[in-house]
Amino acid sequence: MKMDKPGGISGESPLSWAVAENDRHVLAMVADAVKDRRLRLAYQPVVVAANPGRNGFHEGLMRVLDPTGRVIPAREFMGVVETQELGREIDCAALAMGLDALRRHADLRLSINMSARSIGWPRWMRILQNGLLAAPDIGERLILEITESSAMTVPEVVAGFMSDLRRKQISFALDGFGAGQTALRHFREFSFDILKIDAQFTRGIATDADNQVLMAAFLSIARQFDMVCVAQGVEQAEDAAWLAALGVDCLQGYYFAAPSVLPGWEVAAKAAL
């Protein structure tokens, strides 16, 4: 007889039971949010390091609203849903909202996150194709961000996918570089346009000699493969200044702005109505 509780005679440890129970709760919460359309994009600027008053582009970060309206960031659920079909639904929703924002705001350049597992997903591809038909320049203003860990699961598939969509002028960013296990030989196959350095290497970098050496190496890789280098997770003025002096192209983080579900251009558009 198997018992569905911690310490039951099934032999499942209390910790394993608690983790599994939390995962079930997260999956149910996200599934309800998808069904009830309680999904939003939160927009965060990626600023030009040499001129922080100028935005290079914005990133659209997925947010889920719980039944009370509380905003839940992707880090609290994507690890659980990414390998599930629900993860494909999240990617579809993010793409649809991002394409709609690009259609409504002609001067917006926007990056949208996706998992490599969504490549070839029929509904995701339909949303992309329909969105590109809405305006002739949307492809030029769309950046698709693929995490390092996701890209490495199927590198050959990712490379072919990128090659196909580049014909539509879409750009690609490798997200969270340094956090996964990228084989550097794949850089030649991928040809990412943007390299986003994981926040663990940027926080406190002004006084961290080890991360300073690593960041210089990452920037050298970006230069070699003709990629724009973005430092993520910038939260302090001294870190921003150090990264700009090194020659990093763009900076992203709470020092400049927190992600917002109601960015300035949406406020202006509503005020004009």
Image: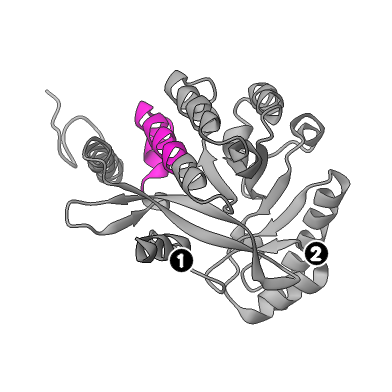
Front residue of this view, candidates 123 and 139:
139
Q: Secondary structure at mark 1?
A: helix
Quadrant in the rendering for residue 46: bottom right
Separation of residues labelled 2 and 1 (CA atoms): 37 Å
Residue 23 located left or right of residue 107: left
Dominant secondary structure, magenta: helix
Residue 82 located left or right of residue 208: left
Spot occupied by residue 5 in the image (x, y as percentages of width and height): 15, 39
Residues shaded magenta = 77-97
Residue 190 located left or right of residue 263: right
Instruction: Reply yes or no: does residue 87 show up in magenta.
Output: yes
Q: Nearer the viewer, mark 2 or mark 1?
A: 1
The mark tally for this picture is: 2
Where 201 sits versus 174, above or below? below
Where 186 sits versus 51, above or below? above
Instruction: Reply yes or no: does residue 105 show up in magenta.
Output: no
Q: Mark 1 highlights which residue? A: 264
First in sequence: mark 2 or mark 1?
A: 2
**Residue at the image position 85 percent from the left and 51 percent from the top:** 223
Q: Mark 2 highlights which residue? A: 213
Categorize mark 1 by other alpha carbons within 10 Å: few (<14), some (14-19), many (20+). Answer: few
Front residue of this view, candidates 228 and 271:
271
Callout 2, which amino acid? Val
Where 207 sits versus 71, above or below? below
Q: How is the image coloured?
A: one colour
Categorize mark 2 by other alpha carbons within 10 Å: few (<14), some (14-19), many (20+). Answer: few
Spot occupied by residue 19 in the image (x, y as percentages of width and height): 30, 44
